[in-house]
Image (spheres, helix red, strand yellow):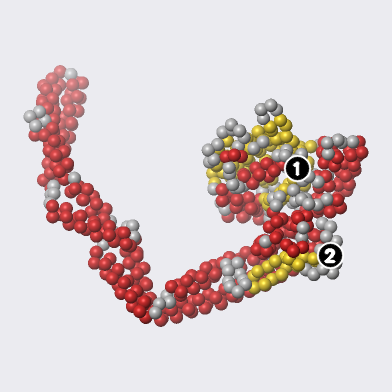
């Protein structure tokens, strides 16, 4: 359940906080007061697209924070699988958007990706946007609703189906790639053998390129090295005033007076240590010089070897390890071509086995869908009757694709008849905008009873309806709110009257700014807001009395 929403510096909202309750939470307000910003902020916090234009003017950042309570063990288990653990039974999701356009998403103070935010959100909340009912016009979405309805029964089967489909498509691709005639086969064998021989003749060893590059750098800079070493030897050991002689003189000078002062004894010991160190350094430097060999022949050999290795890297891989791996791949491919008929027969057998398993799984998934489609259609039909479809028929039609997909071979669509004697027809041929809103509400309420999502948000789901239909929609939403938390933005007083918790979104303007705020209404304030929704600008005593009666009638639905 969504417990709390905190918004700061977002569009018209300077800073606002609202605490939601269980049951039906209604958000109402004048057109343009900022109702859409509230839903927009929730979407934003849950991983929606970010634009720096969303920030208030001159604000350095915007912040949206949501606090959810997680009471169902099924929800907690799904979250744990995502490595998300409720703290004291709560999940805190926040998103901070900076003026630069950068954003930071956090769950329980840990930074996470926007994709993980969306995955977690899909477990906790379902948001129905203003125009989502239009998705019903695309039949490709109809199967999604059915699969959501049958999720528990389909989950394992669909995962197995996707895995077998991948195996099937891989086999098909390999078989298509393997279709060579005798001449192509001979050319391919010859070319593979040439490439393998080229790699074998190089006798590559992992790591040798790094050693060769180090030797190459050393040899190619031989003159610089010799000049620098000669200068160093001149300064440290061979010059008329070299460091070794100078430090030796210093040691002798201190030793002649060290007996007169203990402090001088310590200093003499230190400089003797320095004398020993420089002597060791001179010996090691001299040894290094004696081993130096800047042979032109050696340099040319190293350069030629590096050129060969780099040529092979350009053809077969970025490293020697990659080249050797590519050689192994070519050997396997050569073996396949040399045993071409046997290889093709194996692929054909694998493809046949994969297709048999795929067909079996497609049929199993289809059978489950058909079984659940009857239940989904029947429950949706009953929900539609509750929404003032007096004589409605609702079914799901199945057809079979002429090819396999990772989702099976089914193609589905909803069919509806809203008048007696009329045949069932596709939704896009029958339903108006207002009817689509009610059909979507019916589907949402049916689906809500078959998943673990506790919070539903309806953003003006009452679009295109009024009168008796509006009253029936209100009652349906109210009944759904008995088992779920509903957050509903509405402009209809029939729905607003059903509120368990009523919030008003209002806009205030001054000379230099416009601000939207949201506040909770008590019963008396809620009745006045209903009167505004009923009567417009002028609220008469009659309108106020109507609002009071509407609220009392809504109480009876409880």
Q: Nearer the viewer, residue 2 or 35?
A: 35
According to the picture, the residue beneath numbered tag 2 turns out to be 419
Q: Are marks 2 and 1 in contact (CB under 8 Å)?
A: no
Residue 173 drawn above or below residue 14: below
Identify the element where label 1 is drawn.
Answer: strand
Identify the element where label 2 is drawn.
Answer: loop
Asked whether, in this view, residue 199 is left or right of residue 405, the answer is left
Tell me the residue at 15%/43% (across/down). 223
Residue 214 drawn above or below residue 401: above
According to the picture, the residue beneath numbered tag 1 turns out to be 27
Residue 133 drawn above or below residue 535: below
Tell me the residue at 68%/41% (across/down). 37
Residue extending furthest toward the top? 260
- Mark yes or no: residue 406 visible: yes
Q: Position of residue 273 (x, y in %)?
A: 18, 31
Asked whether, in this view, residue 324 is left or right of residue 23, the answer is left
Residue 339 drawn above or below residue 156: below
* Residue neighbourhood size for the residue with mark 1, other residues' Cα within 10 Å, grouped as few (<14), some (14–19), many (≥20): many
Q: Position of residue 362 (x, y in %)?
A: 61, 72
Q: Quadrant of residue 147?
A: bottom right
* Residue neighbourhood size for the residue with mark 2, other residues' Cα within 10 Å, grouped as few (<14), some (14–19), many (≥20): few
Q: Position of residue 502 (x, y in %)?
A: 78, 41
Tell me the residue at 21%/50% (across/down). 216
Q: Quadrant of residue 398?
A: bottom right
**Disc 2 versus disc 1: nearer the observer:** 2
- Mark yes or no: residue 255 visible: no
Q: Quadrant of residue 15?
A: top right
């Amino acid at each position: 359940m969504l417990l709390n929403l905190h918004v700061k510096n977002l569009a018209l909202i300077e800073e606002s906080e609202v605490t939601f309750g269980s049951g039906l939470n209604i958000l109402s307000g004048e057109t343009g007061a900022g109702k859409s910003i509230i839903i927009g902020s929730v979407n934003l916090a849950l991983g929606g697209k970010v634009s720096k234009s969303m920030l208030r003017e001159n604000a350095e950042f915007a912040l949206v924070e949501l606090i959810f309570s997680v009471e169902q063990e099924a929800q907690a288990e799904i979250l744990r699988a995502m490595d998300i653990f409720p703290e004291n039974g709560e999940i805190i999701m926040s998103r901070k958007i900076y003026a630069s356009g950068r954003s930071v998403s956090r769950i329980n103070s840990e930074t996470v990706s926007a994709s993980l935010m969306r995955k977690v959100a899909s477990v906790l909340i379902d948001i129905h946007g203003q125009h989502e009912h239009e998705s019903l016009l695309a039949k490709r979405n109809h199967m999604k609703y059915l699969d959501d309805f049958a999720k528990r029964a389909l989950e394992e089967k669909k995962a197995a189906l996707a895995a077998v489909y991948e195996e099937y498509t891989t086999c098909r691709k390999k078989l298509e790639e393997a279709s060579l005639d005798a001449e192509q086969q001979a050319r391919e064998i010859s070319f593979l053998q040439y490439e393998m021989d080229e790699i074998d003749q190089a006798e590559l060893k992992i790591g040798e390129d790094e050693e060769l590059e180090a030797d190459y750098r050393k040899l190619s800079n031989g003159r610089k090295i010799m000049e620098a070493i000669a200068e160093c030897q001149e300064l440290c050991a061979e010059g008329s005033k070299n460091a070794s002689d100078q430090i030796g003189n210093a040691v002798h000078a201190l030793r002649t007076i060290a007996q007169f002062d203990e402090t001088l004894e310590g200093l003499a010991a230190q400089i003797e240590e320095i004398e020993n160190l420089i002597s060791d350094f001179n010996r090691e430097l001299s040894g290094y010089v004696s081993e130096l060999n800047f042979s032109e022949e050696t340099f040319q050999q190293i350069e030629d070897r590096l050129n060969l290795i780099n040529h092979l890297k350009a053809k077969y891989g970025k490293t020697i390890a990659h080249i050797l791996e590519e050689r192994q791949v070519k050997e396997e491919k050569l073996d396949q071509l040399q045993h071409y008929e046997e290889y093709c027969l194996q692929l054909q057998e694998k493809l046949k086995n994969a297709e048999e398993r795929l067909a079996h799984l497609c049929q199993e998934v289809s059978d489950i869908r058909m079984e659940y489609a009857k239940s989904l259609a029947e429950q949706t039909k009953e929900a539609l009757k509750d929404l003032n479809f007096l004589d409605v028929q609702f079914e799901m039609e199945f057809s079979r694709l002429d090819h396999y997909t990772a989702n099976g071979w089914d193609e589905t669509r909803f069919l509806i008849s809203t008048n007696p004697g009329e045949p069932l027809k596709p939704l896009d041929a029958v339903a108006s905008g207002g009817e689509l809103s009610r059909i979507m509400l019916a589907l949402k309420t049916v689906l809500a009873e078959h998943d673990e999502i506790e919070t539903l948000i309806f953003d003006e789901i009452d679009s295109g309806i009024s009168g008796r239909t509006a009253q029936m929609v209100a009652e349906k939403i109210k009944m759904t709110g008995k088992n779920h938390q509903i957050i509903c933005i509405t402009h209809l007083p029939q729905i607003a009257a059903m509120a368990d918790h009523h919030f008003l979104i209002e806009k205030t303007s001054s000379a230099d700014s416009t601000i939207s705020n949201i506040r909770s209404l008590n019963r008396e304030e809620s009745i006045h807001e209903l009167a505004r929704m009923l009567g417009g600008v002028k609220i008469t005593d009659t309108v106020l009395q109507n609002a009071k009666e509407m609220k009392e009638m809504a109480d009876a639905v409880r």
